[in-house]
Amino acid sequence: MKRWQKLGCLGVLLMVAACCTAPVLVVAAARARGSATAGSPVSAAAAGIPERMFAAYLTGAAQVTAYVPGCRGMRWQVLAGIARVESDHAAGHLVGASGDISPIITGPRLDGSGAGGNTTAIPDTDGGRWDNDAAYDRAVGPFQFLPETFRAYGKDGNKDGTISPHNADDAAVAAAVYLCGSGRNLGDREQLRAAIHTYNLSWAYVDDVMSGIDRYDALGTAPALPSGNVGAVVQAALAQQGIPYSWGGGGPEGPSTGICCSPGGQDGGTVVGFDCSGLTQYAYAKAGIMLPRTAAEQAGAGRRIPASAGFGALRPGDLIFYGYSPTSDSTIHHVGIYLGDGKMINAPRPGKQVRIDPVTAMPDYAGGARLL
């Protein structure tokens, strides 16, 4: 911000099957609708935003209430409006699957020379850690935080144990937290404008950001939840976003400790959470359906949807499977719940949390099952 301008996952055999793998992170859809039109789906392509940056904006909107419980009205469109002005959605830079941006984005040196509109010198506050300048500060990352401000508001958006303004997820969550303040209602236009003004003390800047937000709002939001039992299943699963993965953990009653040990070495007995099939058991229990424990066993429940039918045969609420052989249920090692629009709610693997992933995040699609 330019202040100077202003067990299914246990697999087929408990101790030998590979665990869930999901190399591409696409996270939590924004819950707050704000002034957008609910129920109208929108894609990164429709918004003209790189997919990985779009995912980061969804992350920021979804995670903000964990840090500012009173915040209302935060949505991906607000974060996209800020980042459009600050970095054009990290244009000209590579954004990796983890959200790390290269080369890093830095603004002009804030030495008071007038370059970039800065006439007030801001001596270095980070030892050059984030801006590679040990004499003066520079705004950093796709949201152009001053290092000192990011140090106060930075969050680990992608849950990798590192907080960096040069990670799209970390920066998006930090921007969301900053804009929410002590609990603003960003669905109220005047409060939203005031929040943006704190980000950059220029009303021309506010108008520029708002023009982008209004355009993104006009596109729509994430799809509305289905009704009935399907909606109960989907909502129950979505509500677990952020719960840790636990090898062998979770079940119809909710998250729990699991067992030792995953192929990667996680002792689920030390983590309260869900593995992939524990999550699906929990969600379907909300509709009165008791699923078997493992992903391979769950493939035998309901009406089987073959992999040959493609992702287009799936409907929201369907189980979605991954296996070493798409025609052999005994090889299935992972299960999620299909959300529509090419996405699923997923407990991916040890070290990660329940989140939304694209259905293409794993390579060995093995069809689905419809129970509702």
Image (cartoon, grey):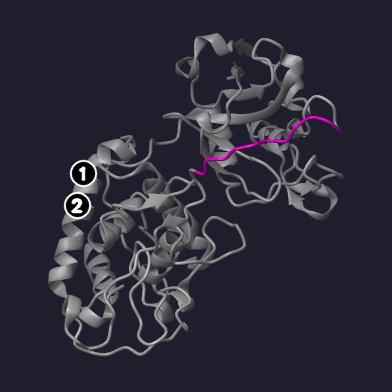
Tell me, yes or no, if residue 231 can be seen here: no
Which residues, given as a range, are shown in magenta?
Answer: 15-25
Q: Is residue 213 left or right of residue 294?
A: left
Q: Is residue 287 above or below residue 139?
A: above
Any mark on residue 73, and which?
none
Of the residues shown, which amino acid type is indicated by label 2? Asp
Q: Is residue 144 left or right of residue 236?
A: left
Q: Which residue is mark 2?
A: 214
Q: Residue 327 lies in magenta, yes or no?
A: no
Graded by Cα atoms within 10 Å as few (under 14), some (14 to 19) or many (20 or more), the crowding at tag 1 reads some
Q: Which quadrant of the rendered structure holds the N terminus?
A: bottom left
Q: Residue 142 appears at what percent x and percent y? A: 35, 61
Total numbered circles? 2
Give the Cα distance between marks 2 and 1: 6 Å
Q: Closer to the camera, 81 or 75?
A: 81
Q: Are marks 2 and 1 in contact (CB under 8 Å)?
A: yes
Any mark on residue 218, and which?
1
